[in-house]
Every structure is written in C-alpha cells, then in structure tokens.
Image (cartoon, rainbow, N blue to C red):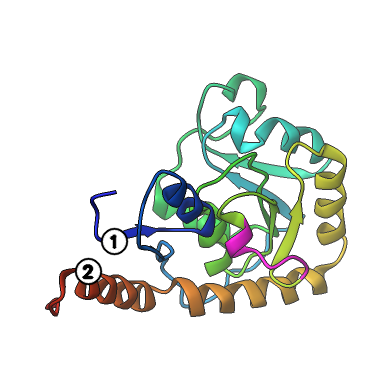
Amino acid sequence: ARARLVICASTALARAARTLGAGEVEIIPSGVTIPAERGEEAHPPEVLFAGRLSREKGILELVEAARGQKLVVAGDGPLRARVPGALGFVPHDELGQLYARAAIVACPSHREGFGVVCAEAMAHGRPVVAGAVGGLLDLVVDGETGLLVQPRDVQALRAALLKLLGDAELRRRLGEAARERARSLLSWERVTGLTLGAYERASGRAVST
C-alpha cells in the first residue's frame, strides 16, 4: 500500500494487487523478442509444450489429450516420470528452434500470472491452445490468434488440438495474427517505453535512457 505505483504484467495480476491493497496499478506486459522470420513446420506436425512439468501447468491433461499425435515436451519437474519422452531442461536458444518448427504450442495451465511461453510462441508465429485463465486471457484472442479451453477439460483440449492439426490454413492464419499481436503488444520497444513512462509519472521526473 506504500508503493506509489505497482506495475503488473497482466489483468489478473493487477486484480490480485488491488485486492492486496495496491493503489495505482498499471498493466505492462513482459516483453518478448520477435524473430525476423517464421520457421517452417516440422512434418508430421508437432505439438509443443514448454515449461515446468507440474500439475498446475496442465501437462497431465495434455499428455492424454495429445495421445496419438507428435508431442514435444521441453521441461523438467516433479511429473517428469509421467511424461514419456520429455526432453528435460532446454536452453532458451534451443527452445527457439522448437518454437520455430512447432505446428501448435500448448499452454493448458490451470493458473498463469502472465504466460511467457504463450507470448514467445506468438512471437514465433505459432497458434496457441491455452487455458482460459489468468494472463493467458490477455494474450490469446480466442479464434483469432489461438484457441482457449477451460482448464482440466481433456476433451476440449483434444478437440482444439485436432482442429488445428487438421487444418494447416487455420494454423497459418492464427499464427500470423498471433505474431502481429505479439509485435504490437509485446515488443521490447513498446514495453520499455511504457515502463519508462510509468517510472517518470511515479517519480515526477524524466528517466534517462
């Protein structure tokens, strides 16, 4: 409550901050690097999951929903033994290569403050199938840049995955729209400008760069 300004990365986090007594709150998303080009999809098409292998990330539902499809899992965590073929920790530069070849990136989280993986996937021009929770609601425009599903709903998750896997043109259209949304909302130039502006207003003086 003593802070002059609280910066939050999503509407969900801003709501939580206000509940805790924050006064002035400004929403500024985390920035992402926009690659110069979109990569070419692998064949057969791959569904990519990147992140911690824990229940709240929805990985168990995804393993079930993606049965019979090519699922690439980059990450480690307490549920790794229940995720066959998981790659373990993947360095960020190598993760970029996985984004570039993915047909879909799945972010079926039960809760999510922002959604860095979702944002990075969008920057790579990949449609995202995401849980309709938290910061993911700020990032994904359902039916335009990706598909939203209710968390823990395996059937809905599988239906969304199969819809995209069966329609290359839909993947292309949603992926291009996702990339443009990332460029307009999440570029480092925009995020840096918003952050400096917020500091200037809070401090009452210009911030030099």
Identify whether 191 is placed above or below 135.
below
Total numbered labels = 2
Instruction: Tell me the quarter of the picture where residue 191 sits.
Output: bottom left
Q: Is residue 151 left or right of residue 36?
A: right
**Residue receiving disc 1:** 5
The image shows residue 114, relative to residue 146, as above or below, that is above
In the rendering, at what x and y percent does residue 59 appear? Answer: 66, 34
In the image, residue 62 sits, relative to residue 43, either above or below, namely above
Element class at badge 1:
loop
Instruction: Look at the image and say whether residue 88 sits in the magenta stretch.
Output: no
Are the residues at dot 1 and dot 2 in contact (C-beta closer than 8 Å)?
yes
Image coords of residue 3 (percent x, y): 24, 54
| 81 and 58: which is toward the camera | 58
Which residues lie in the magenta part?
A: 137-143
Q: Nearer the viewer, residue 187 or 41?
A: 187
Give the residue at mark 2: 202
Q: Residue at x 74, y 34 (%)?
A: 61
Q: 33 above or below 90? A: below
The kind of residue on which mark 2 rests is Ala
Determine which quarter of the picture holds residue 84.
top right
Is residue 142 located in the magenta-colored stretch of the structure? yes
**Separation of residues labelled 1 and 2 (CA atoms):** 6 Å
At x 75%, y 36%, the residue is 152
Q: Position of residue 34 (x, y in %)?
A: 45, 72
Considering only order in the chain, which callout, 2 or 1, is on the residue closer to the N terminus?
A: 1
Dot 1 alpha-carbon crowd within 10 angstroms: few under 14, some 14 to 19, many 20 or more: some
- Front position in the image: 73 or 127: 127
